[in-house]
Amino acid sequence: MKKLLLTLAVLASAASACGIATGDIQATVSAQVASTVAAQTPKEVQVTVEVPVEVPATVEVPVEVQVTVQVPITVVVEATPVAGAADTPPAPAATNPPVVSTNAQDPLAGANPAPVIDEKFDFPDRYFWYLFDTSTGEGKIENETFILIAKEPERLEWTFDGKKFGNAYVTAKTLVPNTTCKAGDNWGLIFRHKDNANFYLFGVSCDGKYRLLKRVDGVFETIVDFTDSDAIKDLGQRNVLGVRAAGGQISMYVNDQFLGTVADGTFAEGVIGMYVGSRLTPNLTVSFDDIAVYTIGQ
């Protein structure tokens, strides 16, 4: 190629000296160049070109990922006690005779001086006692007293307040008309009621006896069987019942007289209630009033 260019330069100079037109020379030379180029063998030439490209070091790509998370949840459900009924226990299951202490126990020892419940039934829904009327029994508030009726013999009818207690002293005034009660008919207090199949029951009978039972999984068991007591007044007179439950010690009272203390820790807490149990009398009716609850050590 260098030789060709040199030749062209020489020819152009010579042509100028000889008076030959430069255009003619260019035409001639162009033809020769074209002929020469056409005769050349084409060659592949590799060319490397550096092109600057900016590449981000981190590329964020949004991705939606569906994730299922299982979270354990504990739900505590507290059952609401309701008025209930049961057949009067004809013969509670035999248990080992309890050790009964006759050492007098002050029912309010260690108790708060002010009652947490002081029910006089002057307001029908004050402490949410359960009212009911069924084919076997009825519970109602009348003349500022709570009336419990067992419509059929061999039945227990009960009702409850909805507040739960552990250690407490419970007391209530009770009255049974002297024309509507026979031997074996009884009434009293329920305490540490867990549900209708699990609770304690303390009561007195129309023939001047008291007893303490517990119901475990729907089966009545005797803690203290019917026992005579001069503290129980005759029919038609008010009898004030009291029961003190502190830990596993249960003490019983009638008309402010101490009856005895037994040890039983089957139930630690529950709601309080009252009951009427007919053995022989249809429509056995008992009125309850001035129910008080004193918490112990709380």
Image (cartoon, rainbow, N blue to C red):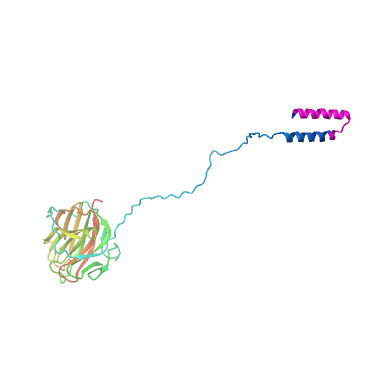
Count every numbered label the image shows and give the total: 0
> Which residue is depicted at the point 73% across and 34% down?
39
Residue 258 counted in the magenta span? no
From this view, report whether residue 275 is shown above or below residue 167. Answer: below
Tell me where residue 276 appears, x and y as whole percent. 19, 66
Tell me where residue 279 appears, x and y as whole percent. 15, 67
Residue 13 counted in the magenta span? yes
User: Please, what is the dominant secondary structure of the magenta stretch?
Assistant: helix
Tell me where residue 179 appears, x and y as whole percent. 15, 72
Determine whether, in the image, residue 96 is placed left or right of residue 198.
left
- Residue closer to the observer: 28 or 186: 28
Question: Could you say which quadrant of the image residue 211 lies in?
Answer: bottom left
Q: Is residue 38 visible?
A: yes
Q: Is residue 157 visible?
A: no
Single out the residue that lies furthest toward the right: 19
Determine whether, in the image, residue 112 is placed left or right of residue 3.
left
Tell me where residue 56 appears, x and y as whole percent. 56, 39
Single out the residue that lies furthest toward the front: 39
Question: Could you say which quadrant of the image residue 243 lies in?
Answer: bottom left
> Which residue is depicted at the point 82% across and 29% down?
11
Determine whether, in the image, residue 70 is placed left or right of residue 212.
right
Which region of the structure is painted magenta? 2-24
From this view, report whether residue 165 is shown above or below residue 139. Answer: above
